[in-house]
Amino acid sequence: MRLIMLDTETTGLSPFSGDRIVEIGAVEVVNRHLDPEKTFHHYINPGRPIPAEVVRIHGISDAHVKDKPPFAEVAAAFLDFIAGATLVIHNAPFDLGFIMNELTLAGLPDIAAVPVIDPLDLTRPRH
C-alpha cells in the first residue's frame, strides 16, 4: 500500500476567509517503509501577509516566503506526487480545505476522489 503522510502550514484557520498555505510537506511510505528519497516539500508565497500570531505558531514569516513560488507553481508536481496514493493527514478536513481551495484557485481539479485516512478520526473515540 502506498501512503502519503501530509501536512500544511497556513496563514490562518480558514481558506474561506482568504487564508492560504505557506508550507506543504509530504513523505511516501510503501508497505510500512519510509523512502527518504520520495518527499515533497515547498514553502509557498501566500500572496498575503502572515499574521504575527500565526508566525509565533509555525515560525514561517513573510520574509521567509517572499521569494518562494505561489501554490499554483507547485500544484502540478504535488498532484503527480500524490497520484495513486492514500493520503494520511491528521485533522484532514483542515488541510484538505486549504489544498482544495488552492487547487481551485490554480484552476486545477480537486482531489475529492483521493482516499484519505485521518488518524484523529481513529483516536478520537478512544480518547
Image (cartoon, helix red, strand yellow):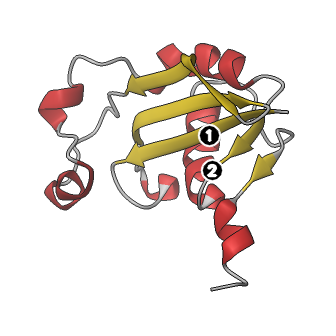
Is residue 23 left or right of 25 when viewed as pictured? left
**Residue 82 coordinates in the image, percent (x, y):** 71, 26
Residue 101, above or below 54: above
Mark 1 crowd level (few <14, some 14–19, many ≥20, 10 Å Cα): many
The picture quadrant where one finds residue 125 is: bottom right
Image point (77%, 48%), residue name: 116
Residue 2 vs residue 97, the one in the foreground:
2
Quadrant assignment for the C terminus: bottom right
**Residue linked to disc 1:** 5
Residue 87 vs residue 127, the one in the foreground:
127
Q: Which kind of residue does numbered mark 2 sit on?
A: Ile
- Kindly indicate whether the residue at mark 2 contacts the one at mark 1 (C-beta within 8 angstroms): yes
**Residue linked to disc 2:** 89
**Residue 38 coordinates in the image, percent (x, y):** 59, 17
Mark 2 crowd level (few <14, some 14–19, many ≥20, 10 Å Cα): many
Residue 34, above or below 89: above
Residue 121, above or below 61: below
Is residue 98 left or right of 33 when viewed as pictured? left
The picture quadrant where one finds residue 47 is: top left
Is residue 28 left or right of 70 when viewed as pictured? right
Image point (27%, 50%), residue name: 58
Secondary element at image label 2: loop
Q: Which kind of residue does numbered mark 1 sit on?
A: Met
**Residue 1 coordinates in the image, percent (x, y):** 85, 33
Is residue 65 left or right of 77 when viewed as pictured? left
Does label 1 or label 2 sit earlier along the sequence?
1
Residue 62 vs residue 34, the one in the foreground:
34
Secondary element at image label 1: strand
Give the CA separation, mark 1 to mark 2: 6 Å
Image point (17%, 35%), residue name: 62
